[in-house]
Image (cartoon, rainbow, N blue to C red):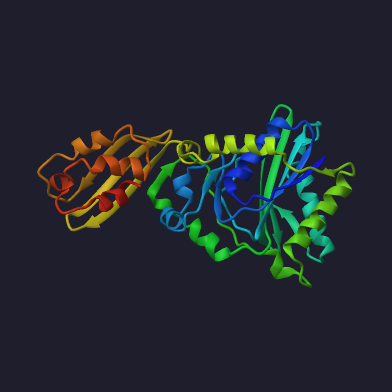
Amino acid sequence: MLFINSLNHYAPFNIACEEYILNHFPQDVFFLYRNDSSIIVGRHQNTLAEINLDYVKKHNIPVVRRLTGGGTVFHDLGNLNYCFLMNRNGDEDRGFARYTAPILAALKNLGIDAKLEGRNDLTIKGMKFSGNAKAVYSNKVHQHGTILFSSKITDLSAALKANPLKFKDKAVHSVAARVTNISEHLLKPVTLEEFIQLIQNEVLKFYPDSREYRLTAEDEKSINTLMKNKYETWEWNFGHSPAYNHIQMIRCPAGTIEFHTDVHKGKITGLRIYGDFFGELDPSELELALIGLPHRVEAIRKVLETLPLNEYFGEVDIEDILTGLI
């Protein structure tokens, strides 16, 4: 097994690195990384339904869709991410227990009674500190998880505080849980760097042939290309969301306006506008103008700037309409 510890804290790079390792390394790999503030969305989730978009935009937080299923998680430098990228050996039916065992062993050595509970959560005193996700391919197993060590939990809550009433869809939705940091349960102070070493020691017990590997310049070049072409793109991170219906009502000087927006493969496929506003033009013209656009602020704003919004609704501005559509 190879140990790879990423020195890069940019989430799109590290998520791209997981895919690169999966597809280009014939060896088993144990990969560790930390990200600056970022949101990582499950493969089958509706991104907009999982995040607080206003908070994310205000704080310039990267949002990245990963390859595995499960729920949305918030990363920061107080959160350690671990990943097993393994060749299949016919022992894949042990669920999440096999690859969470070294994490639990490291915590036991620190005097912390941590458990694997439910389907894929690691807990301390019933509170979640690690969520795990998994994908099994024809010849590989890809399992990874978060470890809240000293994360800013208030930031986590704010970034993921989406309004569930806005969306009707069949996507996989995250379930809120009480969370905790490992640092709150330590009997004596331990740094995150020391904790990383403890985990590596435990992995070494499970896989004695392990050795360290540093990404080469050629590796990083390929990872950066994958990152730019996939993990930094709106098409993958937002447009890949399952079909959904976005419903939002706004109140403005023109009156009450209600927007029902159908989205498929990231593009607006249907739009109906209702309300008690008074306008000179039929809003169905505006509805048609937005059909086919990506369901993203920049694309919609560009078209709205060309339309006589006051003639459709009365006293409104572009920001009012964008609030109803996104």
Question: From where the camera sits, is residue 119 visible?
Answer: no
What residue is at 41 percent from the left and 43 percent from the top? 168
- Compared across the picture, whether 3 is left or right of 154 comes to right
Horizontal arrangement in the rendering, residue 231 relative to residue 103 (left or right): left
In the image, farthest residue toward the top:
138
With respect to residue 219, does 195 lie above or below?
A: below
Q: Is residue 310 above or below residue 129?
A: above
Residue 41 shows in this picture: yes
In the rendered structure, the answer to whether residue 149 lies left or right of residue 43 reads: right
Q: Position of residue 54 (x, y in %)?
A: 41, 56
Q: How many numbered markers are drawn?
A: 0
40 and 44: which is toward the camera: 40
Question: Seen from this angle, which residue lies furthest left?
Answer: 280
Looking at the figure, which quarter contains the N terminus? top right
Q: Residue at x 24, y 35 (%)?
A: 289
Q: Is residue 83 above or below residue 291?
A: below
Where is residue 103 drawn, in percent x and y?
A: 77, 54
Please tell me in which quadrant of the rendered image residue 312 appears.
top left
- Looking at the picture, tell me which residue is in the foreground, 20 or 149: 20
Residue 256 in picture, x, y percent from top left: 22, 54
Direction from residue 94 to residue 308 in the image, left or right = left
Seen at 28% across and 36% down, the residue is 290
Q: Residue at x 24, y 57 (%)?
A: 251
**Residue 98, position in %: x, y?**
79, 44
Furthest-bottom residue in this view: 188
